[in-house]
Image (cartoon, helix red, strand yellow):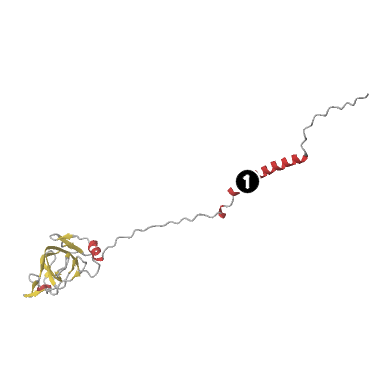
Amino acid sequence: MSTNITPPPMPAQPPQPGKKNHTNAYIIGGAAIIAATIVGTGIAVSDSGDDTAKPQPTVTVTETIEPEPAVEEGAAAATDESTDTKVGEEARNGGAVVKVTKMVEADSITLAGAHKSAGADGKYVILKTVVSNEGKASMDLTCSLPIVNALIDDQGRRFDTIEDLYDVAGNPECNAQLQPGFDDEMQFVYRVPKDAVVTTWEFSEYDLESEVTPTLVDLT
Protein backbone atom coordinates (compact mmCIF):
# COMPACT_ATOMS: atom_id res chain seq x y z
CA MET A 1 0.00 0.00 0.00
CA SER A 2 1.46 3.17 -1.03
CA THR A 3 1.15 6.42 0.95
CA ASN A 4 1.12 9.90 -0.69
CA ILE A 5 3.09 12.41 1.34
CA THR A 6 2.16 16.04 0.68
CA PRO A 7 5.11 18.36 1.30
CA PRO A 8 4.46 21.17 3.74
CA PRO A 9 3.60 24.53 2.18
CA MET A 10 6.44 27.02 1.65
CA PRO A 11 6.51 30.01 4.00
CA ALA A 12 4.79 33.02 2.49
CA GLN A 13 7.17 35.64 1.05
CA PRO A 14 6.34 39.30 1.66
CA PRO A 15 5.34 41.00 -1.53
CA GLN A 16 8.24 42.72 -3.18
CA PRO A 17 7.74 46.36 -4.01
CA GLY A 18 7.16 46.77 -7.63
CA LYS A 19 8.69 49.33 -9.93
CA LYS A 20 5.45 51.24 -9.90
CA ASN A 21 5.63 51.87 -6.14
CA HIS A 22 9.23 53.10 -6.40
CA THR A 23 8.23 55.41 -9.23
CA ASN A 24 5.35 56.91 -7.24
CA ALA A 25 7.66 57.57 -4.26
CA TYR A 26 10.17 59.27 -6.49
CA ILE A 27 7.43 61.40 -8.08
CA ILE A 28 5.96 62.46 -4.70
CA GLY A 29 9.38 63.27 -3.25
CA GLY A 30 10.42 65.15 -6.33
CA ALA A 31 7.18 67.11 -6.36
CA ALA A 32 7.76 68.17 -2.74
CA ILE A 33 11.29 69.33 -3.53
CA ILE A 34 10.12 71.22 -6.61
CA ALA A 35 7.29 72.88 -4.65
CA ALA A 36 9.69 73.96 -1.94
CA THR A 37 12.07 75.31 -4.57
CA ILE A 38 9.30 77.21 -6.29
CA VAL A 39 8.17 78.79 -3.03
CA GLY A 40 11.72 79.81 -2.12
CA THR A 41 12.38 81.04 -5.62
CA GLY A 42 9.14 83.03 -5.61
CA ILE A 43 10.13 84.80 -2.42
CA ALA A 44 13.59 85.52 -3.73
CA VAL A 45 12.22 86.88 -6.98
CA SER A 46 9.72 88.95 -5.13
CA ASP A 47 12.44 90.38 -2.90
CA SER A 48 14.78 91.10 -5.80
CA GLY A 49 12.15 92.68 -8.08
CA ASP A 50 12.56 96.14 -9.54
CA ASP A 51 11.46 98.80 -6.99
CA THR A 52 10.32 101.10 -9.76
CA ALA A 53 7.59 98.69 -10.59
CA LYS A 54 6.10 99.01 -7.12
CA PRO A 55 3.57 101.80 -6.52
CA GLN A 56 5.08 104.40 -4.17
CA PRO A 57 2.95 106.04 -1.48
CA THR A 58 2.11 109.75 -2.00
CA VAL A 59 2.94 112.05 0.93
CA THR A 60 1.16 115.41 1.08
CA VAL A 61 2.66 118.14 3.31
CA THR A 62 0.31 120.94 4.25
CA GLU A 63 1.75 124.20 5.62
CA THR A 64 -0.55 126.28 7.76
CA ILE A 65 0.09 130.03 7.79
CA GLU A 66 -1.28 131.92 10.74
CA PRO A 67 -3.08 135.08 9.63
CA GLU A 68 -1.59 138.31 10.89
CA PRO A 69 -3.80 140.29 13.23
CA ALA A 70 -5.60 143.11 11.50
CA VAL A 71 -4.49 146.59 12.48
CA GLU A 72 -6.62 149.61 11.84
CA GLU A 73 -5.00 152.14 9.55
CA GLY A 74 -5.40 155.06 11.96
CA ALA A 75 -3.98 153.08 14.88
CA ALA A 76 -1.00 151.92 12.79
CA ALA A 77 -0.19 155.49 11.77
CA ALA A 78 -0.22 156.64 15.37
CA THR A 79 1.85 153.66 16.57
CA ASP A 80 4.55 153.96 13.92
CA GLU A 81 5.55 157.49 14.92
CA SER A 82 8.18 157.67 17.66
CA THR A 83 8.75 161.13 19.12
CA ASP A 84 12.15 162.70 19.78
CA THR A 85 11.30 165.10 22.64
CA LYS A 86 8.45 166.28 24.86
CA VAL A 87 6.95 169.60 25.89
CA GLY A 88 9.51 171.59 27.88
CA GLU A 89 12.50 169.97 26.15
CA GLU A 90 14.69 171.44 23.41
CA ALA A 91 14.25 169.79 20.00
CA ARG A 92 16.84 170.26 17.28
CA ASN A 93 16.62 170.07 13.50
CA GLY A 94 19.52 171.49 11.52
CA GLY A 95 20.26 174.97 12.82
CA ALA A 96 16.78 175.38 14.35
CA VAL A 97 16.35 174.57 18.02
CA VAL A 98 12.77 174.77 19.30
CA LYS A 99 11.42 174.28 22.80
CA VAL A 100 7.64 173.93 23.08
CA THR A 101 6.83 175.55 26.43
CA LYS A 102 3.04 175.18 26.38
CA MET A 103 0.09 174.02 24.29
CA VAL A 104 -3.21 175.90 24.56
CA GLU A 105 -6.63 175.21 23.02
CA ALA A 106 -8.99 178.16 22.51
CA ASP A 107 -12.23 179.03 20.75
CA SER A 108 -10.81 182.36 19.53
CA ILE A 109 -7.56 184.28 19.13
CA THR A 110 -6.49 187.89 18.71
CA LEU A 111 -5.37 188.40 15.12
CA ALA A 112 -4.20 191.82 13.89
CA GLY A 113 -5.74 193.35 16.99
CA ALA A 114 -9.17 191.83 16.30
CA HIS A 115 -11.08 188.95 17.85
CA LYS A 116 -11.24 185.93 15.53
CA SER A 117 -13.43 182.91 16.32
CA ALA A 118 -12.64 179.34 15.30
CA GLY A 119 -16.34 178.67 14.56
CA ALA A 120 -18.81 176.20 16.03
CA ASP A 121 -17.10 173.18 14.47
CA GLY A 122 -13.48 174.18 15.15
CA LYS A 123 -10.95 175.28 17.73
CA TYR A 124 -7.51 176.87 17.79
CA VAL A 125 -4.43 175.06 19.03
CA ILE A 126 -1.61 177.43 20.00
CA LEU A 127 1.94 176.15 20.53
CA LYS A 128 3.98 178.62 22.54
CA THR A 129 7.66 178.11 21.76
CA VAL A 130 11.14 179.56 22.06
CA VAL A 131 13.13 179.34 18.83
CA SER A 132 16.93 179.51 18.85
CA ASN A 133 18.89 180.12 15.68
CA GLU A 134 22.04 178.00 15.77
CA GLY A 135 22.51 178.07 12.01
CA LYS A 136 24.72 180.17 9.77
CA ALA A 137 22.08 182.58 8.43
CA SER A 138 19.19 184.65 9.76
CA MET A 139 15.60 183.35 10.05
CA ASP A 140 12.36 185.13 9.22
CA LEU A 141 10.03 183.18 11.53
CA THR A 142 6.67 184.58 10.39
CA CYS A 143 6.98 185.37 6.68
CA SER A 144 9.51 183.18 4.86
CA LEU A 145 8.72 180.20 7.10
CA PRO A 146 12.25 178.85 7.73
CA ILE A 147 10.74 176.18 9.97
CA VAL A 148 8.48 173.73 8.12
CA ASN A 149 5.93 172.32 10.55
CA ALA A 150 2.68 170.39 11.01
CA LEU A 151 0.32 169.55 13.85
CA ILE A 152 -0.72 165.87 13.97
CA ASP A 153 -3.71 164.30 15.73
CA ASP A 154 -4.43 160.75 16.91
CA GLN A 155 -5.87 159.85 13.49
CA GLY A 156 -2.67 160.80 11.70
CA ARG A 157 -4.22 163.95 10.21
CA ARG A 158 -1.79 166.80 9.53
CA PHE A 159 -2.72 170.47 9.96
CA ASP A 160 -0.98 173.61 8.65
CA THR A 161 -0.63 176.86 10.57
CA ILE A 162 -3.07 179.67 9.91
CA GLU A 163 -2.00 182.43 7.50
CA ASP A 164 -0.32 185.65 8.61
CA LEU A 165 1.34 184.39 11.78
CA TYR A 166 2.93 187.85 12.08
CA ASP A 167 -0.57 189.17 12.94
CA VAL A 168 -0.81 186.92 16.02
CA ALA A 169 -0.35 189.02 19.15
CA GLY A 170 3.15 188.53 20.55
CA ASN A 171 4.71 187.06 17.41
CA PRO A 172 7.73 188.61 15.61
CA GLU A 173 6.86 191.01 12.80
CA CYS A 174 7.19 190.07 9.16
CA ASN A 175 10.83 190.30 7.98
CA ALA A 176 12.09 190.54 11.56
CA GLN A 177 15.24 188.51 11.02
CA LEU A 178 16.31 186.25 13.88
CA GLN A 179 20.08 186.39 13.68
CA PRO A 180 22.40 183.41 14.35
CA GLY A 181 23.09 182.94 18.04
CA PHE A 182 19.81 184.60 19.16
CA ASP A 183 16.41 183.28 20.20
CA ASP A 184 12.85 184.62 20.16
CA GLU A 185 9.39 183.65 21.35
CA MET A 186 7.13 182.32 18.64
CA GLN A 187 3.52 181.07 18.60
CA PHE A 188 2.46 178.50 16.01
CA VAL A 189 -1.35 178.63 15.64
CA TYR A 190 -3.58 175.97 14.03
CA ARG A 191 -7.30 175.67 13.41
CA VAL A 192 -8.48 172.07 13.81
CA PRO A 193 -11.82 170.22 14.17
CA LYS A 194 -13.54 170.59 17.53
CA ASP A 195 -13.13 166.91 18.41
CA ALA A 196 -9.50 166.55 17.23
CA VAL A 197 -7.10 165.02 19.76
CA VAL A 198 -3.67 166.51 19.12
CA THR A 199 -0.69 164.24 19.84
CA THR A 200 2.42 165.40 17.96
CA TRP A 201 4.16 168.43 16.51
CA GLU A 202 6.53 167.98 13.58
CA PHE A 203 9.12 170.50 12.37
CA SER A 204 12.24 170.73 10.28
CA GLU A 205 14.57 173.45 9.04
CA TYR A 206 13.67 174.51 5.52
CA ASP A 207 16.22 173.14 3.03
CA LEU A 208 15.86 173.17 -0.77
CA GLU A 209 19.06 171.25 -1.46
CA SER A 210 18.43 168.04 0.50
CA GLU A 211 15.66 165.99 2.06
CA VAL A 212 15.41 166.59 5.78
CA THR A 213 14.06 164.13 8.33
CA PRO A 214 11.62 166.03 10.58
CA THR A 215 11.82 166.17 14.36
CA LEU A 216 8.77 165.05 16.36
CA VAL A 217 7.63 166.51 19.68
CA ASP A 218 5.21 164.62 21.91
CA LEU A 219 2.33 166.88 22.96
CA THR A 220 0.36 164.39 25.07
Kindly indicate the quadrant of the structure image that contains residue 66: bottom left
Left or right: where 199 falls relative to 68 = left
Left or right: where 216 falls relative to 30 = left
In depth, the one of 174 and 19 nearer the eye is: 19
Query: Which residue is drawn at the image coordinates 67% and 42% (left, top)?
Result: 32
Q: In which quarter of the image is the N terminus?
A: top right
Residue type of the residue flagged with mark 1: Val
Q: How crowded is mark 1: few (under 14 residues within 10 Å), some or many (20 or more)?
A: few
Residue 217 x, y percent position in the rendering? 17, 62
Left or right: where 65 falls relative to 57 = left
Q: In which quarter of the image is the C terminus?
A: bottom left
Residue 146 x, y percent position in the rendering? 17, 69
Kindly indicate the quadrant of the structure image that contains residue 4: top right
- Residue at label 1? 39
Q: Label 1: state its secondary structure.
A: helix
Query: Which residue is drawn at the image coordinates 67% and 44% (left, top)?
Result: 34
Q: Which residue lies furthest to the top in this view?
A: 1
Kindly indicate the quadrant of the structure image that contains residue 130: bottom left
In depth, the one of 99 and 114 nearer the eye is: 114
Decide: is 147 above or below 34. below
Decide: is 90 above or below 176. above
Query: Which residue is drawn at the image coordinates 23% and 63% (left, top)?
Result: 75
Query: Which residue is drawn at the image coordinates 9% and 75% (left, top)?
Result: 116
How many labels, in total? Answer: 1
